[in-house]
Image (cartoon, helix red, strand yellow):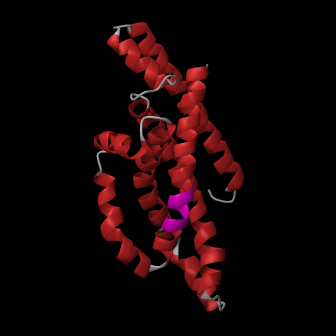
């Protein structure tokens, strides 16, 4: 139970940090072409970044404690979430923008009343995807100096050839991942019931 709790904490913290950075930045990039044009050469290649290759670098930068694990999960989800947020904003139906413009909406009103609400359902779905990616990377994050965590249990069990413990760890991760996915889906459904 303690190991599952630590893994859940790490995934949640990485997930929240990536949302705090990716959602506002993605809204800016999706709304203002100049911002997207400026940041795209840096942001677009990040999708091809091999996160596992960053582990040694993160060890140098953040040490072997909790910060390294959370930052690895943060970067691992951020590089996928940011393009999805940009895509969600750009995917808002042009009819809504034209209608609001015809009614005299300013640029700020378009952003606040059309682009942000129109993109939120897609962003909610993107967060479901990021939740799954976070649980994929938790094993990688917990390989190094983790005293607790499902990744630690699986790694130790693998070294000792305890196949039953490996399967148990994988099943717990699967159960928590599915449960959190269902929770996010319910929240999305409640928040965006108007979107079909």
Q: Between residue 148 and residue 98, name the one nearer to us.
A: 148
Q: Main secondary structure of the magenta part?
A: helix
Quadrant housing residue 113: bottom right
Let me know if residue 155 appears in the view.
yes
Residue at 51% across, 25% down: 149
Please tell me which residue lies in front, 55 or 101: 55
Nearest to the observer: residue 102 or residue 148: 148
Q: Which residues are magenta?
A: 20-26
Residue occupying image coordinates x 61% and y 44%: 185
| Left or right: 17, with 46 as reference point | right
Q: Quadrant of residue 50?
A: top left
As displayed, is residue 13 above or below residue 176? below
* Quadrant (top left/top right/bottom left/bottom right) for the N terminus: top right
Give coordinates of residue 41: x percent, y percent.
30, 69
The picture places residue 154, in percent across and down from the top left corner, at 42, 19
The magenta stretch spans residue 115: no
Q: Is residue 172 above or below residue 107?
A: above
In the figure, is residue 12 to the left or right of 157?
right
């Amino acid at each position: 139970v303690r190991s599952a709790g630590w893994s859940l904490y790490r995934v949640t913290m990485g997930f929240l940090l990536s949302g705090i950075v990716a959602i506002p930045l993605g809204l800016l990039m999706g709304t203002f072409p100049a911002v997207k044009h400026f940041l795209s050469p840096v942001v677009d290649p990040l999708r091809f970044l091999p996160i596992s290759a960053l582990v040694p670098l993160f060890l140098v930068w953040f040490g072997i404690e909790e910060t390294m694990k959370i930052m690895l999960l943060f970067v691992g989800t951020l590089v996928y979430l940011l393009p999805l947020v940009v895509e969600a904003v750009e995917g808002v139906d042009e009819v809504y923008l034209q209608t609001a413009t015809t009614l005299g909406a300013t640029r700020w009103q378009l952003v606040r009343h059309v682009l942000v609400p129109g993109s939120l359902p897609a962003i909610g779905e993107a967060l479901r995807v990021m939740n799954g990616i976070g649980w994929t990377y938790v094993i990688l994050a917990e390989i190094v100096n983790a005293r607790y965590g499902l990744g630690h249990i699986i790694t130790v069990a693998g070294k000792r050839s305890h196949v039953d413990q490996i399967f148990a760890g994988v099943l717990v991760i699967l159960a928590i991942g599915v449960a959190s996915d269902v929770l996010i889906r319910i929240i999305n459904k409640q928040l965006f019931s108007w979107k079909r």
